[in-house]
Image (tube, rainbow, N blue to C red):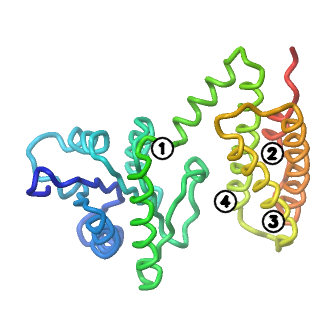
Amino acid sequence: MPKDKDTKVCFVIAPIGTEGSDVRVRSDQVLKHIITPAARECGYEPIRADQISEPGLITSQVIQHIVQDPLVIADLTGRNPNVFYELAVRHAIKKPVVQIIQAAELIPFDVAGSRTIHVDHHDLDSAAKAKEEIVRQIHSVEKNPGDVDTPISVAVELQSLRQSDNPLEKSNAEIISMLQEIRVNLADIREEPRRFRVHPGAVEELGMLLGRLADVVDAEDGKMATSEQLEALRMVHHRSERALYHLCRDAGIPPEAILRRSRREAKPKQE
């Protein structure tokens, strides 16, 4: 723990492993050479669960740090279940968190919508770049500490829109659902082994369509979508589904299961 009671604490959620294990060696190196310099540059003192020295139940102390500390940095490397449990607690209270992951690993689709920093701790350039990006993200959340979106908060807000009596708010929920569905589908494809070479044109088209959806949603932040915009977005969704079908086919992945949810979301609701 930092000695100065006025020092801001940054709690580090990370896979720790047993003493001497590869997991522990990597976690220590990332903490020492990347996280700690970045956090201290921004005025925070990092602390990891194994560094908590106060007497008492360690689980309760970890949760206390997750809930109370002004900043959390979460290392998603290895998909450690404790890491994701603790990350979910932080997401639930909608407080600032910076996510990092080993460069070679895929981001699980549950948190793929949150900006995540890739780092290769064996590569000095990658480590330096990751440290700079952590600093940049910390400064960003400090400017707007209340402007934090997490998968949990987005899901709660989306459910509220769906239950609204305002038809435009329900339509906005439909737009967000379509955008989330495409992101999940892309993550599903990345998880599958590639048996065939994916045509770059399919990836480019799907990325362009996803960008168009995101641009409209961002441009209309805080506003209700018009009927014309909704119709245009439905067309984008239809074309995205078609591009996704070809992408699945080229990758050797059966497209039916991946597209089933998309079709269900896009189906007009009966009054």
Q: Mark 2 and mark 1 in contact? Answer it, CB < 8 Å.
A: no
**Residue in the foreground of this view, choosing between 266 and 226:** 226
Residue 158 rendering spot, x and y as whole percentages: 63, 30
**Residue in the foreground of this view, choosing between 29 and 72:** 72
Q: Amino acid at mark 1?
A: Val
Q: Residue at x 47, y 56 (%)?
A: 79
Cα separation, mark 3 vs mark 2, equals: 19 Å
Q: Earlier in the sequence, mark 2 or mark 4?
A: 4
Element assignment for label 4:
helix
Q: Amino acid at mark 3?
A: Val
Q: Residue at x 67, y 59 (%)?
A: 191
Local packing at callout 4 (Cα closer than 10 Å; few below 14, some 14-19, many 20+) is: few
Residue 229 rendering spot, x and y as whole percentages: 85, 38
Q: Amino acid at mark 4?
A: Glu
Cα separation, mark 2 vs mark 1, equals: 33 Å
Q: Amino acid at mark 2?
A: Ala
Cα separation, mark 2 vs mark 4, equals: 14 Å
Residue 39 rendering spot, x and y as whole percentages: 30, 64
Position of 16 compared to 195: left or right? left
Give the residue number, with chain letter if any, for mark 1.
Answer: 148
Q: Identify the mark at residue 191; answer none if there is no mark.
A: 4
Give the residue number, with chain letter if any, for mark 3.
Answer: 203
Asked if residue 168 is positioned above or below residue 204 in the image, the reply reads above
Q: Give the residue furthest to the bottom.
A: 124
